[in-house]
Amino acid sequence: MKSGDNVARLFVCAAQKDEIGRDVAKALKLELKKQGLKNRLLDGEKHKVRVQTCNCLDLCKHCKKGPGAALIIYPEGVAYGDVRPRDAAEIVHEHLGEGRVVKRLQLD
Ligand code: FES
């Protein structure tokens, strides 16, 4: 794969009864734009960042019991739970920008 083909993907569960997953995905896209992080550096290589909604991620406890949505970031495979639109700025800045996991939202 050429380095220009690398993609980082954020999959946001949108299987909840309300619109929270879609709202989280929208907020993440907005933050990527605002923070100029549509591309990120990972292990010294440029990755395009794509945010997508998806069906159930099998982390339902964090979608159905909490007020937020579950999401997974690849290629790392880090999962976050109970994410709300207001958490988007921190996930984008810390995880994608600085390469630091947002511990308070991370799922084991
Ligand atoms: S409903 Fe979101 S992970 Fe299952």
Image (cartoon, rainbow, N blue to C red):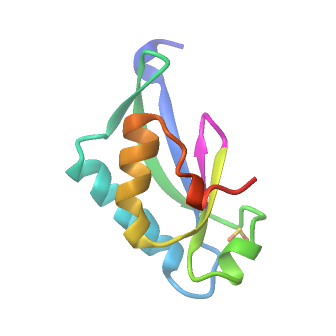
Q: Quadrant of the N terminus?
A: top right
Instruction: Report whether 16 appears left or right of 3.
Output: right
User: In the rendered view, would you say 60 is above or below 106?
Assistant: below
Q: What is the x, y in percent for residue 54?
A: 60, 62
Q: Is residue 18 magenta?
A: no
Instruction: Report whether 58 appears left or right of 69.
Output: right
Q: What is the x, y in percent for residue 78?
A: 64, 45
Q: Residue furthest front?
A: 104
Q: Quadrant of residue 49?
A: top left
Decide which of 98, 96 is in the foreground and name it: 98
Q: Residue furthest top?
A: 2
Instruction: Report whether 60 appears left or right of 69.
Output: right
Residue drawn 43% across the image and 15% down it:
44
> In terms of image quarters, where does ligand 1 lie?
bottom right
Q: What is the x, y in percent for residue 101?
A: 54, 44
Give, as a single range, the part of the protein colored magenta. Answer: 71-77
User: In the rendered view, would you say 18 is above or below 87?
Assistant: below
Q: Quadrant of residue 18?
A: bottom right
User: In the rendered view, would you say 59 is above or below 94?
Assistant: below
How many numbered dots are placed on residues in this image? 0
Decide which of 51, 98 is in the foreground and name it: 98
Residue drawn 47% across the image and 12% down it:
2
Q: Quadrant of residue 30?
A: bottom left
Residue drawn 34% across the image and 58% down it:
89
Q: What is the x, y in percent for residue 47?
A: 42, 28
